[in-house]
């Protein structure tokens, strides 16, 4: 049992951040499904939408598609950091910041909190395009950081397994 306590490090605040990221990932999957498909069957018919609304709806699908890997990469980066007991790097912080800002905007728009859904509808395809750019950069930075930590993490896992 002590060995599990050493691995998990519950006292570390990053452990609770990891749990919050996992909950956010599950919530985002549901929000992405609702945003892409619509909550009601009559919203799923793109023929009733105007030309501009169809383009924006398609762009939000791409935002959701880029958001989910970014959140998963953030979870993996944080899990490896906790497991290794390493400090975060600037690349991880910057990548996580890009993904977090895009996630916050996506959630606010998809739930129409503070009238953000209506506002983004007026902005057009520029808003989702900006979020896609942020997510591409954030995803790439988090992937680079994870690949940089991967050899040390694999050596630690091999040590835990007794190899």
Image (cartoon, grey):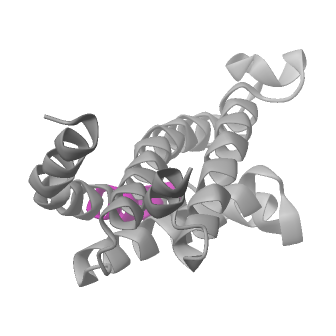
The residue lying at 29 percent from left, 75 percent from top is: 86
Image quadrant in which you'd find residue 16 = bottom right
| x then y, percent, for residue 87 | 31, 81
The residue lying at 28 percent from left, 60 percent from top is: 142
Q: Quadrant of the C terminus?
A: top left
Image quadrant in which you'd find residue 31 = top right
Q: Nearer the viewer, residue 135 or 75?
A: 75
| x then y, percent, for residue 157 | 24, 43
Tell me if 42 is positioned left or right of 60 in this view. right
The residue lying at 20 percent from left, 36 percent from top is: 162
The residue lying at 52 percent from left, 57 percent from top is: 2
* Residue 121 shows in the view: no
Tell me if 152 is positioned left or right of 53 in this view. left
| x then y, percent, for residue 126 | 48, 61
Task: Find the magenta span and give its range.
Answer: 128-138
Q: Is residue 106 magenta?
A: no
Q: Nearer the viewer, residue 97 or 2?
A: 2
Tell me if 153 is positioned left or right of 127 in this view. left
């Amino acid at each position: 049992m002590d060995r599990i306590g050493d691995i998990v490090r519950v006292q570390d605040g990053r452990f609770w951040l990891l749990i919050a990221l996992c909950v956010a990932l599950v919530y985002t999957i549901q929000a992405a499904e609702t945003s892409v498909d619509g909550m009601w069957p009559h919203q799923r018919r793109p023929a009733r939408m105007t030309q501009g609304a169809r383009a924006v709806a398609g762009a939000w699908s791409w935002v959701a598609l880029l958001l989910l890997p970014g959140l998963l990469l953030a979870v993996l980066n944080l899990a490896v950091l906790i497991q290794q007991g390493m400090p975060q790097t600037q690349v991880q912080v910057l990548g996580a910041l890009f993904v977090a800002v895009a996630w916050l905007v996506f959630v606010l728009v998809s739930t129409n909190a503070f009238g953000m859904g209506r506002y983004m509808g007026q902005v057009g395809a520029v808003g989702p395009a900006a979020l896609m750019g942020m997510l591409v950069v954030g995803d790439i930075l988090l992937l680079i950081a994870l690949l940089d930590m991967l050899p040390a993490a694999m050596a630690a896992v091999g040590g835990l397994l007794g190899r």
